[in-house]
Amino acid sequence: FGESMKKATIIIFLVIVLSFVASFYFSPQMPERVASHWNAGGEVDGYIPKIWGLFLMPVLSLVLALLFLFIPKIDPLKENVQKFRKYFDGFIVLTMLFLFYLHLLTIYWNLGGRFNMVYAMVPAFSVLFYYIGVMTGHAKRNWFIGIRTPWTMSSEMVWDKTHQLGGKLFKISALVALAGIFFGQYAIFFMVGPALLTAACTFIYSYLEYKKEKPTV
């Protein structure tokens, strides 16, 4: 996957550079205090100084990208990461695009654009959830990426079964999140709720599968 990783890395850092460029370009037009947080109804309920509003997201994107690219190098099970590396690289690219999209939405709002922020975020979260489902379904046992419970880390079979279930649940979560756009102020719960349920279900499922495999434990 060397060539795939090289292309992904180029895209990742190109997106980050564009994020910084957008911040510098629009800086003169931005107010001294910028809207930075929206409530469940899509209304602003938090402000921060302009410098943070413009550069927090690009800096966060850079730190996350470096962390994501570094993680596979130090994982004791790095050989397993290589087995689904193209999906992981795709996840990093998508995460950077997701953060860039949120950054542009924030800039646009603070330049005077008006829209419902929650509605604007729903499709982005849906795409991210769906791709997480794709990656989860292909993930092999490692220490950093995937559904890591004491039981998935103790058994290859439990890992595989849990990730197959988790992949399906994340894809369902994506569809539920997208449906939230039709439920006004409750849309945020359609994004957060399924993700929390998926985490809980996979945690419990991994334990039950481990008990089945090792009934004396």
Image (cartoon, rainbow, N blue to C red):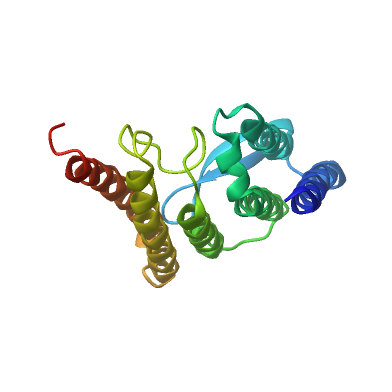
Q: Name the residue furthest left.
A: 216
Nearest the eye: 165 or 130: 165
Residue drawn at x 63%, y 44% is 82
Q: Give me the residue at 41% from left, 52% from top.
A: 40
x 42%, y 56%: residue = 41
Residue 210 is situated, as x and y percent measured from the top left of the image, at 24, 41
In the drawing, does residue 66 fall left or right of residue 20? left
The vertical placement of 117 against 82, above or below, is: below
The quadrant where residue 54 appears: top right
**Location of residue 148 by image quarter:** top left
- Identified at 58% across, 63% down, the residue is 115
Counting from the top left corner in percent of width and height, residue 128 is at: 54, 57
161 horizontally vs 103: left or right: left
Asked whether residue 59 appears in the rendered view, the answer is: yes
Q: Nearer the viewer, residue 147 or 181?
A: 147
Residue 195, visible in the rendered structure:
no
Q: Nearer the viewer, residue 130 or 164?
A: 164
| The one of 192 and 32 positioned closer to us in this rendering | 192
x, y percent for residue 72: 63, 35
Q: Position of residue 4 (x, y in %)?
A: 75, 54
Q: Quadrant of residue 31?
A: top right
